[in-house]
């Protein structure tokens, strides 16, 4: 199968929210702490009539309806979540009721777990299946859903919730660019759920882990990109020798591209625990680009090496780079549809401009190697501020268009980065055709990946213009009911009481749900959950 990727996306979030500004007043913190400090506007929350299973049922059902997909045409269903209600029974098995009633019980896949990374693991499993010899020709479905709740304190405003269903198959408008994916995984205790209703979280450490994993992924992606270039050069040499050409001319061949930079990317979509985190993450990528750009200038290289040496650090081994050229046709497989040199986007121009007038003094003062940042760099406020300021123009054009669901619903954990992609598709639609989107997924504990998706022109119901008009995130956000902070807090207390409880009927009203929503109708004495449809 070719051009395997995402055909369509459907985001679900509850119909109730609390305003972060109201929460600041309620929590008696300084005005601006949650809105400016974390960058959040509102936070979605559920009552006891919804849970992660009902949200997942709603997202999958709604996607199948909107795109008129026959449930029998699904051959794999993968779920990513960290909100599982049972230590044995997967959420996937609950979702099977939507398929079994149509006679389809032949669906592979179960749940993937690792904090906010589960949805990405599920997506990669689904894409790999469609690309593999095991594929039976049917489509795959990926569901990512979570409810993020924190104990009272500074982490609470970084909660949220939501679900996303993604249809995966060949000839996709959102094509995963194979070969352009880098991961970083290691053991950390930054956020985990060993017991109890709320997670244990070391907030500052989780922020540093997010940034460190992003740095590692980006450095590794740049290296892989350069490796693709060497493969291409080898192929070019082979082509030349097999054609017996003695001319040595490469006039019809593109010359070598430089290492990957933000100028090769049109949009960045990142896991968003809160918008300020994404802001900091993007600034890190920008900072790496800035360092690499400097290292490409011999005079700068010497200065940076001297600075590294003064701090007892070894200079990195550098590969040579050549002037800017469109590198995308060199990446295996997925990019064949991108023809001709890529026109400069506003983002490219911004990146270049910002590089020149960046807060260079502060950025340059830091003795960093882009392949190996010292851990102090994650706590250096001056460095962070300078990188954030320098990258603000590029952030507005490359990142902000993906932040609608994140700033309005809060952290959707496993669904977060994918809901960012859906937000971007809703806003940009067919403009994404021929554009490269860099995706960053981070799950505490920790697992992270950075990969590329390329927008493609396809006809019919999966055309980006159609998917964009079907998502209707903005419309539904505006139609939500605003709750007072006191209601939000008492609802959290109710959910805390319901945690691991048997024999109850939810008390929150069904009026709070939009029609077309699944809800929890009751839990029996054996903890078995029943669901109904509004
Ligand atoms: N006006 C404007 N900004 C303010 C104000 C104010 N009145 N008060 C504080 N701020 C700013 C701070 O300057 C700081 O900005 P900076 O990050 O640019 O320096 C920001 O608000 C946060 O304030 P802090 O005091 O540094 O941190 P806080 O104690 O509020 O905790 C944290 C923030 C750690 C993110 C907390 O919400 C948390 O633990 N969240 C859960 C963990 C999390 O989301 N981690 C992210 C990755 S892991 C994951 O996805 C779960």
Image: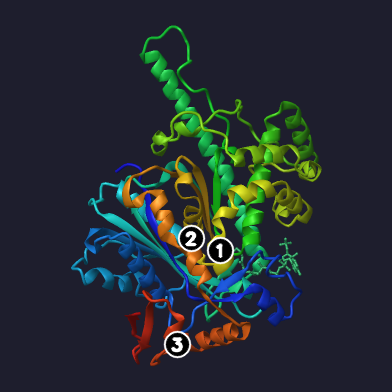
Q: Residue 46 in the image: x percent, y percent?
A: 49, 79
Label 1 or label 2, whichever comes before in sequence order: 1
Q: Is residue 4 above or below residue 471?
A: above
Q: Residue 8 in the image: x percent, y percent?
A: 38, 55
Disc 1 vs disc 2: Cβ atoms closer than 8 Å?
A: yes
Residue at far left of view: 103
Disc 3 vs disc 1: Cβ atoms closer than 8 Å?
A: no
What is the CA distance from the residue labelled 1 to the residue labelled 2?
8 Å
| Left or right side of 434 for 411 | right
What is the CA distance from the residue labelled 3 to the residue labelled 2?
27 Å
Disc assigned to residue 509 = 3
Q: Residue at x 55, y 41 (%)?
A: 265
Residue 50 is drawn in which quadrant?
Answer: bottom left
Disc assigned to residue 47 = none
Q: Residue at x 51, y 74 (%)?
A: 480
Residue 99 is drawn in which quadrant?
Answer: bottom left
Whether residue 445 appears in this view of the structure is no
Q: Is residue 190 above or below residue 489?
A: above
Disc assigned to residue 406 = 1
- Quickly name the residue at label 2: 419
| Left or right side of 274 for 364 | right
Helix, strand or loop at label 3? It is loop
């Amino acid at each position: 199968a070719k051009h395997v990727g995402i055909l369509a996306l459907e985001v679900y979030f509850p119909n109730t929210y609390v305003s972060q500004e109201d929460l600041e007043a309620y929590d008696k913190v300084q005005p601006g702490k949650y809105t400016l400090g974390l960058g959040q506007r509102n936070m979605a929350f559920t009552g006891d009539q919804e849970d992660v299973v009902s949200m997942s049922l709603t997202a999958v059902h709604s996607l199948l309806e909107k795109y008129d997909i026959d449930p029998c045409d699904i051959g794999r269903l993968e779920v990513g979540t960290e909100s599982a209600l049972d230590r044995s029974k997967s959420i996937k098995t609950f979702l099977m009721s939507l398929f079994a009633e149509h006679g389809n019980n032949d669906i592979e896949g179960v749940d993937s777990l690792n904090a906010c990374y589960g949805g990405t693991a599920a997506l990669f499993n689904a894409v790999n299946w469609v690309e593999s010899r095991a594929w039976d020709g049917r489509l795959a479905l990926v569901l990512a859903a979570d409810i993020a709740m924190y104990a009272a304190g500074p982490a609470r405003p970084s909660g949220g919730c939501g679900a996303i269903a993604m249809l995966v198959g060949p000839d996709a408008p959102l094509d995963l660019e194979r070969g352009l994916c880098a991961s970083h995984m290691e053991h950390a205790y930054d956020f985990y759920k060993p017991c109890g209703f709320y997670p244990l979280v070391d907030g500052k450490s989780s922020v540093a882990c997010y940034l460190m994993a992003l740095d590692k992924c980006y450095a590794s992606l740049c290296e892989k990109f350069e490796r693709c270039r060497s493969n291409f050069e080898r192929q070019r040499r082979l082509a030349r020798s097999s054609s017996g050409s003695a001319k040595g001319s490469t006039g019809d061949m593109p010359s070598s591209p430089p290492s990957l930079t933000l100028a090769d990317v049109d949009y960045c979509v990142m896991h968003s625990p809160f918008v300020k985190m994404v802001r900091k993450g993007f600034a890190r990528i920008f900072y790496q680009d800035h360092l690499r750009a400097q290292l490409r200038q011999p005079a700068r290289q010497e200065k940076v090496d001297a600075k590294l040496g003064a701090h007892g650090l070894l200079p990195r081994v550098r590969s040579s780079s050549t002037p800017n050229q469109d590198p995308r046709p060199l990446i295996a497989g997925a990019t064949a549809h991108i023809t001709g040199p890529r026109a400069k986007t506003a983002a490219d121009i911004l990146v270049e401009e910002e590089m020149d007038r960046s807060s260079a003094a502060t950025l340059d003062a830091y003795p960093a190697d882009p392949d190996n940042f010292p851990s102090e760099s994650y706590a250096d406020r001056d460095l962070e501020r300078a990188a954030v300021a320098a990258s603000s123009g590029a952030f507005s054009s490359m990142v902000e268009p993906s932040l609608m669901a994140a700033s309005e619903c809060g952290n959707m954990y496993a669904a977060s980065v994918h809901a960012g992609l859906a937000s971007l598709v809703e806003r940009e639609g067919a403009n994404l055709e021929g554009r490269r989107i860099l995706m960053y997924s981070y799950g505490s504990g920790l697992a992270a990946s950075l990969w590329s998706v390329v927008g493609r022109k396809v006809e019919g119901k999966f055309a980006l213009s159609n998917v964009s008009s079907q998502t209707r995130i903005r419309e539904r956000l505006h139609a939500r009911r605003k709750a007072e902070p006191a209601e939000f807090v008492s609802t959290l207390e109710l959910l805390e009481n319901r945690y691991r409880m048997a024999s109850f009927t939810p008390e929150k009203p069904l009026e709070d749900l939009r029609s077309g929503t699944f809800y929890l109708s009751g839990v029996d004495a054996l903890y078995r959950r029943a669901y109904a449809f509004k």
